[in-house]
Structures are given as C-alpha cells and as structure tokens.
C-alpha cells in the first residue's frame, strides 16, 4: 500500500537510520494499526512502514490479513480521516506493486522493449503514466491497455512508469523506474604521423557502462571498458596514405547491438610526407595552417583535445576538453537523478572530489563539469528539504574546486566560461535555501554555515575567525524567521573582480579584501547591516559591493548600487556596509532589473523634476483656464492636458512609493506591493489613453474640417476611454494573475510580474499599441500639412515650413508618448545604454510637457501674464507683424491651418497666427 501526502519531502526520510525517519515511521504505523484493526482477518501489529519516497511524500506500508478477498475501502477511508486529523493532508491511498512492469534486464538505446501490466482480477480501466504524466493511447499501448511498448527506446524515455487502475474499489498501482542507457558516444581519433619508422598507439573510448573491442584484429586482442588501445608499427616501406589508410574498427562487444549505427567507429592512420609542416608535435603530428586535429585524453580522462594550426612555425593551439572519467560518469548519472537520491549522490561526489583534488583543480574542463553537477543538484533540491550532512558534503565539493586560483583565472577570462563563477554562487544560495528549518552549524576549513531562527531582531558574528558581523534591526512582530548565513573566506579564488564598467574583464589592482557573506531569509526584512574586517589594511579605498547575477547580460559582477562603506568608530580596519535599494524607471517596460548607480540617479532625478514640472503645469492651467477654454476645441485640448499631467503626476508618486516599499535584498511584501502596483498600472495606463485621446482629437480636427461634435459627447467619450479602459485592464490583470501569486514581481520592485505569468504584458501591449497609433496620427497630420502648403512653397518659405514641422514633431512627441517606444529596446536587451536612454526620455516626460505644452505657447504666456498683471495690456499686444510677403504659399497654408483647426503656430520671422484655442505652439 502507498500513501501520497501533501507536504514538503524531507530527504532525511530516505535514510532509515535517521531520527526523522524513525519518528514518522512510528507515528504512521500507529495510525495505520488503528485504521485497519477492524478489518476481517487483519493480523494485529502487522502494519509496517517500509520506506518514504519523494513525490509529496509517498509512504509505502504493508499489512497482513488472513485472506486477500476483503474490502479495504472502509479502512482506507478511516486511515485518510485519521491522518488528516493528525495534520497530514492525504491526497490518495492505493495498493502498489514495485518493479512489476519489466524484467528484461539492461535497456540499450534504440532497442525494443515491452512493459506489461498485470493487475489482479476485477480491475477497471488501466491508465499509463510516466513521471506522473498520463501517456495518451497511441500505437505503443495495446487495445486492452495491458502493455506499453517502446519500439526504439532512447535515454529521454527514462523515468518512473506506472499503470494505474482500481481493484475492489481501491486504487491499484504497478510502478517501476525504467532507465535507458545513454548512447555510447564512441570517441575515436584519426592519427597523422610522419612517414618514418615508429609505433603508433591508437585509442578508442566510450562510457564505462559499455565494453569495447577491436573487430577482427588478431594483433589487437584488447577488450575493456572506458578506453582500449592498439599498437601498429610503421616503417618507411609501408607508410599509409590518405587514399590508402590503415583502419581499425572499434565496436561494442555486445552482439545484440552490432546492427545499430552507434555500435562502431573506424580509426584511421595516415602519414604525411611534408618535410616542413606548418605545425608539428608528438600529439597532433604534422599539419598545415587551418588544420584541426583531435587527440585522446590521458588515461583516466574522458573527452578530447582539439588542436588548431593557426600560424606557420607556431605550436598547435590546444583546447583541452579532458574531464576526469569518474566525474564524467557522475555527470551521466545526474541526467536521471531523482530528488531522493541527492544525499547519496552528493556524498559520492564529495568523496571523489576530495580523493582526486589535484587532478580536478588542474583541469578546467573537470571543474566546469563539477559546476554543472552542483547546479543540477541545486535545481533538483528545490522540491525537497535537505539535511545538514548533504549540505556539508556540497560545501566540501565547492571548497575542493575553489582551491586553485589559476584555474579560475583561466575560466573567468574565457568568454565561453566566464559565467561559471556566478552560476556556482547562485547554486550555493539556491541549495542553502532548502535546508531543514532547524538550527544547525557547518564548518569547513574556509566556509562557515549557520542557520538559526529569530522573532524580532538579529545580531551575530560569523566566519572562521569571527570577523563578519551581521545585524537585522527587526522584522514584523511575532513572526518566526529562519536565517541562513554562509561566510566564505576564500571565495576570491572563484569570483572575479569585475563590474558593470569593466566589460566583463577583471579589474587590475582591485581585490576582494574581505569575507564574502550570503544571507538567506524566509521572510522580508527592512534592513541588513554587515560589518567586515579587511584582509589587507594597507589597501585603500574600500567599497561595499554585492554580487549582481544579472549584470553584464547575465555573466554577473560586483555592484555597489546604493551601497556605501563606513568605518566603525574606534575599530581600526573594520568597516560597515549600508545599502539602499533603488528601482530603475525602465523596470516599467522591461523584464530586466538593472541595479546601476547611473540608472538610479537618472530615475529619481528625472521623476523628481517631472513631478515638480507637472505641479507647475497644473497650477498654470488653473490660472488661465477660463481664458483658454472659450470654444469646444480649446476646451477639450486643455481637458486632455490636465488629465495627462494629473495621471502622470499620480503615477510617478505611486512609482516612488512602490520603490520605497522594497528593500535591498528583500522579497516584495505582497500586500503593500500589490496595492502600489495596481495604482502604478492604472495611472500609467490612464496617461497613455489620455495621450491617445489627444492624438485622436488632433486627427479629428485636421481631417474633419467642416464637422463638429458637441462638447458633452466629447467629454463623455474622453472620460470613458481615459479612465474606464485603464481600470478595466488593471482589474482584469489582478483577477487573472493574483490567484496564483503571479501578479507582482517576487523581488526587486513593486511592479507587474514577468517570469511567472507575463502580467507585464498587460501594461506593455496597451502602451506600445497607443504609441504606434499616435505615431501614425503624427504622420497623417504632417502629411496633411505638407500636402496643403509646403509642396508649393518657394525655397526660403519651404525651409520655414520644414522648421515648423520639426517644431510640431518636438511638441507632439511628449504629448503622444512617442518616447515610450524605446521600451521595445528595454524589453529585448539588458544593455545599460538602452535603459539609460529610456529613463532619461521618459522620467522627464512631465518636464517636456511643461516646456512644450505650456511655457512655449505664446497664448498661454500672454494669458498668464494678463492674469498675474506682469505686463501691461499694451505690452502684451505689441509684437512685430512684418514677415515678408503674406502671399507666399507656405505662410498662406499656416494661416489656413490655423483658421480650420483652431491652432496657434508661430514662426521665427515675427508673424504669429494666433487663436484662443491653442494646441500646437512652435
């Protein structure tokens, strides 16, 4: 029988010797005994929990009865009730049989295999699953559902297969873990040697799960696993040529695999008669420029060496892909690793790493393979809870591969491998968050890990030499918080000294001058303070930095954004790090979060200037409202301006509030951030819809010259579209995404989620659609202007008209939101330059609206001056009216455009085409 229980799987349950296993086993056996004691024929005290398997904690147990013809349904229901009453939420209970599907032995690639499901009599319909996913009825499942056939098994077919049915109203499951062997990947190497007397040793290698042999070669009787070799003597009388090489066939010794294409490969030996080759050595032989050769690895290593002849007279340029074979075998095992196998696998990896440390640390390919293994382990561990022993073995492996700084210098300077250090640190943080919620401590020669809990504030000193102090002023009252702290004293061997401005390269003369601390919390905190001792007090200009995984397009680097270093009074050589979090403006349209000082400064300075400008704009509109709204067109134009300014002002305020809610290194608090995100989303959308209305109003007045719409109707449409559409989109977004916790980002900023639900598209799609429509409107308006007047202009007036058009574009761009089109760049790239351009143009949008929409409008300035009595009426009306011949076609067009559309367009020649309802002012 088996139980599926809805709770986190604890890897300590896989070991029958742990206290956790014994405790839960005892609890379950008592509950099972109580549930089945009334079953007819049940043997008292026969309930036995045999093991716990991963998969929301599957408990396998047995009971003994006098007969198998009994009804277990009532007892099963009672067991479910009893477990639920004891705090264990049971998803299902079933009779289960392990390893009852296939008994044909080892399964090799592309072979034919059949799994057979034979439940007891009285079963219902059979359902086949692989790793919990139902397999559809197709040509590999027979009509009666009894058999499942893999006609050409592949390694990707490996997994846990099960056939499920019901027998006597009780679920019945037969299951088995099926492993298809990996392809042998026979590695052979062709040899080119000088034509002289010598003995060539050829080699052929494959995975250790396969046995190799030389086909039909009495001179090469060797058979074995891993690599086999054969010697061939060459003399000047029998030198093999390219057209007539010597061939050796290396094949798998299993006869049943001989017909498969992967079962054999041919090794060739040829000689070169070139007396003066461009490149030549004992490994790759003679060759010419641009030749590429492959050579076998030393004994005990898997992979190959690749030699390229790049220059005449130079050595072969070598790329060493040789990986310690025992590590390569572990990598193959990890491809089909189950989470409950993690403890044993990590223990094996740690043992192998420690016993082969010199060979590992001197091989960059082997170190990279171990980094991939640790990454795989960290990923698998996200569904389980790890114990102290497993974490300790993980850290020991990390310590082994980090002991040689020369190897990491090579990795960090290679474009193809420079992200390895960042991936390794990310794996450590990821697996550190899966430790069991209990107090524990792990110490290795250069790493200390401590996990504790606290309810309000926290203060502790860490590191082997107790030189790192971490303080947390406080969390929400009465909340139980676990904190995991990992302090590395030698991580500078692994992490390069690079930042956003170093172009991915290490910065000369700069070192990591202190411990590296990783702090992992299961709760949100407002502030964390870290105090460090300097390793070398003679070095100057210390900085506080954190490792930013997203820096340099995902390569990772040190970032000092919002951080400052402060010496501690009366403590020489000891410094305190204080960091403040800053949300970049480009986060509004980008899935990339860039923590960069320049971007943060631009964001907050720009938004601050915009907010002040918008307030001033609203004040001016209030002063001159009656003067400037004497007809319908002018009225609607100023209604649009007021609502654009108001929406942008409130949106910017909400943006600042949202940025203040999230603290550096903390998760986004769901309640406050959800509220802030909703209002940011709503008011920025309202901004875009009012900009759309402004564009449509201009288009309407440009195209529909002789028609009109009542002010009441225009107002009704404007407010319905301007606020109704944004509200509808914002509410639907919350309704669709909030239920699964996918409404807001989990960290960095109070804004719409991208990675989990793509909720950000609910802002991006409407915004960019409106930008596209407004751009089209601008093109139509400019086309009308050119068609009506510019084409017939003389050369001087033509230049004047083009200046007017340029001014129109400059004025309408902030009103139409066209600069938000740069958001497309921030969506597809994390390049800092793109985000800076976006932040500059759009955080200052309020300033541009004030300047181009208000201050440069002569009628508004005139009305404002009159209201404030800054100048006399005569001085307000005094202006030059000499602008050349009034009959010029360009100037005549501007006059017609003003009369038809009610717009004020001024030129630099002294002529002013004025109207009381101003929209475009250049």
Image: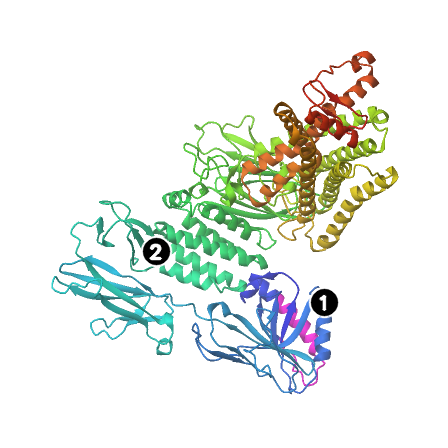
Residue 660 appears in the rendering: no
Q: Are marks 2 and 1 in contact (CB under 8 Å)?
A: no
- What percent of the width, then of the height, locates residue 700? 77, 39
Q: Residue at x 51, y 51 (%)?
A: 427
- The crowding category of the residue bearing disc 2, from other C-alpha atoms within 10 Å (few below 14, some 14 to 19, many at least 20), is many
Q: Residue at x 84, y 27 (%)?
A: 625
Residue 148 falls within the magenta-colored stretch: no
To which residue does mark 2 refer?
A: 322
- What percent of the width, then of the height, locates residue 711? 86, 37
- What residue range appears in magenta? 24-47
Q: Residue at x 66, y 32 (%)?
A: 809
Indicate which label's residue lies in the foreground, 2 or 1: 2
**In this rendering, is residue 907 above or below 451?**
above
- What percent of the width, then of the height, locates residue 154? 47, 70
Residue nearest the viewer, comparing 95 with 549: 549
Nearest to N terminus: mark 2 or mark 1: 1
Residue nearest the viewer, comparing 243 with 312: 243
Q: Kindly state the secondary structure of the residue where label 2 is placed.
A: loop
Separation of marks 2 and 1 at Cα, in angstroms? 54 Å
Q: Kindly state the secondary structure of the residue where label 1 is placed.
A: helix
Which of the numbered marks, if any, corresponds to residue 84? 1
- What percent of the width, then of the height, locates residue 325? 36, 60
């Amino acid at each position: 029988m088996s139980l599926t229980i809805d709770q986190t799987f604890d890897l300590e349950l896989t070991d029958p010797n742990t206290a956790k296993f014994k405790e839960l086993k005892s609890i379950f056996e008592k509950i099972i005994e109580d549930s089945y004691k009334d079953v007819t024929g049940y043997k008292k005290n026969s309930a036995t929990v045999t093991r716990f398997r991963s998969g929301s904690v599957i408990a396998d147990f047995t009971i003994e009865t006098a007969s198998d013809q009994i009804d277990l349904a009532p007892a099963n229901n009672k067991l479910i009730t009893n477990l639920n009453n004891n705090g264990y939420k049971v998803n299902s209970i079933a009779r289960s049989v392990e390893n009852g599907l296939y008994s044909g032995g080892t399964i090799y690639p592309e072979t034919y295999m059949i799994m057979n499901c034979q439940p007891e009599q009285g079963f219902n319909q059979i359902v086949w699953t692989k790793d919990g996913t139902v397999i559809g009825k197709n040509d590999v499942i027979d009509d009666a559902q009894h058999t499942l056939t893999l006609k050409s098994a592949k390694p990707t077919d490996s997994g846990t297969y099960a056939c499920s049915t019901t027998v006597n109203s009780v679920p019945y499951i037969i299951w088995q873990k099926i492993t298809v062997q990996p392809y042998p990947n026979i590695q052979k190497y062709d040899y080119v040697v000088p034509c002289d007397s010598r003995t060539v040793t050829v080699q052929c290698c494959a995975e250790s799960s396969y046995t190799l042999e030389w086909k039909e070669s009495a001179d090469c009787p060797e058979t074995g696993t891993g690599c086999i070799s054969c010697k061939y003597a060459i003399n000047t009388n029998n030198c093999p040529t390219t057209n007539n090489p010597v061939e050796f066939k290396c094949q798998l010794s299993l006869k049943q695999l001989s017909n498969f294409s992967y079962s054999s490969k041919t090794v060739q030996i040829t000689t070169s008669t070139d007396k003066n080759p461009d490149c030549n050595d004992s490994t790759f032989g003679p060759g010419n420029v641009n030749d590429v050769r492959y050579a076998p690895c030393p004994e005990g290593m898997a992979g190959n060496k690749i030699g390229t002849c790049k220059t005449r007279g130079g050595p072969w340029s070598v790329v060493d892909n040789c990986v310690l074979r025992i590590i390569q075998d572990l990598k193959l095992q990890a491809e089909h690793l189950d989470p409950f196998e993690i403890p044993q696998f990590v223990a094996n990896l740690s043992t192998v790493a420690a016993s082969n440390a010199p060979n590992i640390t001197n091989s960059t390919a082997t170190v990279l393979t171990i980094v991939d293994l640790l990454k795989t382990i960290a990923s698998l561990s996200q569904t389980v809870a790890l114990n102290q022993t497993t974490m300790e073995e993980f850290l020991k492996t990390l310590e082994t591969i980090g002991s040689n700084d020369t190897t990491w210098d090579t990795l960090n300077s290679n474009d193809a491998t420079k992200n390895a250090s960042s991936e390794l640190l990310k794996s450590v943080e990821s697996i550190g968050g899966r430790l069991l919620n209990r107090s524990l401590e792990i110490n290795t020669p250069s790493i200390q890990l401590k996990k504790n809990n606290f309810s309000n504030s926290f203060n502790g000193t860490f590191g082997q030499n107790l030189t790192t102090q971490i303080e947390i002023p406080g969390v929400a009252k009465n909340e139980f918080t676990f904190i995991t702290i990992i302090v590395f004293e030698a991580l500078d061997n692994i992490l390069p000294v690079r930042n956003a401005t170093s172009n991915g390269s290490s910065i000369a003369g700069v070192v990591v001058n202190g411990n590296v601390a990783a702090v992992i919390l299961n709760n949100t905190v407002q502030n964390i303070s870290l105090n460090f001792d300097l390793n070398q007090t003679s070095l100057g200009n210390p900085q506080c930095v954190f490792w930013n995984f997203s820096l340099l397009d995902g390569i990772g680097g040190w970032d000092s954004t919002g951080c400052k270093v402060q010496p501690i009074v009366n403590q020489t050589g000891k410094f305190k790090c204080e960091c403040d979090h800053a949300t970049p403006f480009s986060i509004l349209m980008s899935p990339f979060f860039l923590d960069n000082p320049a971007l943060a400064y631009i964001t907050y300075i720009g938004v601050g200037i915009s907010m002040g400008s918008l307030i001033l704009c609203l004040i001016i509109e209030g002063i001159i409202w009656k003067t400037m709204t004497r007809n319908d067109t002018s009225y609607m134009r100023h209604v649009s301006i007021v609502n654009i300014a108001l929406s942008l002002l409130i949106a910017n305020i909400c943006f600042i509030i949202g940025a203040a809610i999230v603290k550096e290194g903390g998760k986004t608090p769901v309640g406050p951030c959800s509220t802030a995100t909703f209002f940011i989303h709503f008011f920025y959308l309202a901004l875009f819809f009012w900009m759309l209305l402004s564009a449509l109003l201009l288009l309407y007045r440009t195209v529909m010259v002789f028609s009109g719409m009542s002010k009441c109707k225009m107002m009704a449409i404007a407010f319905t579209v301007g606020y109704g559409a944004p509200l509808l989109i914002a509410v639907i977004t919350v309704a669709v995404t909030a239920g699964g916790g996918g409404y807001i980002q989990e960290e960095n900023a109070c804004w719409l989620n991208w990675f989990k639900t793509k909720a950000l598209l609910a802002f991006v799609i409407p915004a960019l659609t409106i930008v596209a429509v407004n751009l089209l409107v601008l093109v139509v308006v400019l086309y009308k202007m050119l068609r009506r007047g510019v084409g017939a202009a003389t050369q001087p007036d033509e230049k004047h008209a083009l200046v007017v058009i340029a001014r129109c574009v400059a004025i309408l761009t902030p009103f139409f939101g066209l600069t938000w089109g740069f958001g497309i760049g921030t969506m597809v790239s994390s390049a800092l330059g793109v985000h800076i351009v976006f932040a500059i143009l759009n955080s200052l949008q309020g300033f541009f609206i004030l300047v181009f929409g208000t201050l440069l409008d002569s009628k508004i300035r005139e009305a404002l001056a009159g209201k404030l009595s800054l100048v006399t009426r005569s001085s307000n009306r005094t202006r030059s009216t000499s602008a050349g011949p009034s009959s010029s076609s360009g100037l005549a067009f501007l006059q017609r455009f003003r009369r038809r559309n009610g717009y004020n367009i001024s030129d630099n020649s002294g002529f002013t085409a004025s109207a009381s309802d101003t929209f475009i002012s250049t």
